Every structure is written in structure tokens, then in C-alpha cells.
Image: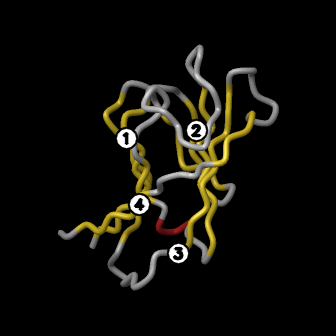
């Protein structure tokens, strides 16, 4: 089963999460619809090395919870994809972390799309 990987590197937009506690922030990353998808392909968002609890959404549709201390967490987003997409990760920052365009490993590791046939 071949996997095609698209890394969602920076820049990420970072802002305080609306209506949330002071240490909650929203990381936002825009991306286009992957090309050459076949009817058998499934597209997954994979977030590595989550150090903070939170939630993920794609195009304002909740994907699920982000649980700290996992090696990775993944969400099947195939049915939520649009020509232009907005991935949001609402997370609680650890103390002494700043909201930046490139999250540090203290927040989360690599974020990627995996196209699985």
C-alpha cells in the first residue's frame, strides 16, 4: 500500500484561540486539494509528537482531539477536502512557549498529509 507524503511546513498562522483560556492558541495552515487522487485514495492528516492537548479541525469541521504525549495522531480527512483547505490546531501552549509561525517541538512535530491507496 503506497503512501504519498505532503509535508505541511511553515509558515503557520498563530493567534489566540477565540473564547479560550489565556494559554490556548490556534495554529492555522492553508493548503490546496492534492492532485491526481483516485477513488481508492484516502487522505490523512498526521500530527507528530504532540506535547499539548487540543483539537483539530479542517474547514471548520471538527476532526478530533489532540492528546499530549502521543507519538502521533491521525485523522482521515478525505470527505472534508475542498479545492482550498484550512487546517486548524487549537492547543494549549506549555509555559514559556511563544506563538510563532514555526511551532517548536515542545508544541508538536511534523504535520503532513498522507495519501494512502
Nearest-to-viewer mark from 3 and 2: 3
Q: Quadrant of residue 14?
A: top right
Residue that badge 3 annotates: 33
Residue 114: percent from left, percent from top: 35, 62
Image position of 31 (left or right of 17): left
Q: What residue is shown at x 40% (from left), y 81% (from top)?
A: 37
Q: Quadrant of residue 81?
A: bottom right
Residue that badge 4 annotates: 113
Nearest-to-viewer mark from 4 and 2: 4
Residue that badge 2 annotates: 55
Seen in the picture, residue 31 relative to 38 is either above or below; the reply is above
Asked if the residues shown at circle 1 and circle 4 are in contact, with their CB atoms under 8 angstroms apart, the answer is no
Rate crowding at label 1 as few (under 14), some (14 to 19) or many (20 or more) other CA atoms within 10 Å.
some
Marks 4 and 2, the one that precedes in the sequence? 2
Residue 24: percent from left, percent from top: 68, 27
Marks 3 and 2, the one that precedes in the sequence? 3
Q: What residue is shown at x 36% (from left), y 84% (from top)?
A: 38
Image position of 86 (left or right of 52): right
Marks 1 and 2, the one that precedes in the sequence? 1
Depth order, front residue of 105/82: 105
Residue that badge 1 annotates: 48
Image position of 99 (left or right of 73): right
SS for dot 4: strand
Amino acid at each position: 500500500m503506497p503512501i504519498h507524503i505532503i509535508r505541511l511546513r511553515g509558515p503557520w498562522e498563530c493567534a489566540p484561540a477565540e473564547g479560550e483560556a489565556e494559554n490556548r492558541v490556534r495554529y492555522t495552515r492553508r493548503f490546496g486539494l492534492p492532485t491526481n487522487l483516485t477513488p481508492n485514495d484516502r487522505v490523512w492528516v498526521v500530527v507528530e509528537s504532540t506535547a499539548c492537548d487540543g483539537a483539530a479541525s479542517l474547514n471548520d469541521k471538527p476532526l478530533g482531539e489532540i492528546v499530549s504525549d502521543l507519538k502521533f495522531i491521525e485523522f482521515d480527512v478525505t470527505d472534508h477536502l475542498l479545492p482550498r483547505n484550512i487546517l486548524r490546531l487549537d492547543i494549549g501552549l506549555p509555559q514559556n512557549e511563544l506563538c510563532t509561525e514555526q511551532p517548536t517541538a515542545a508544541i508538536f512535530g511534523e504535520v503532513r498529509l498522507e495519501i494512502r491507496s
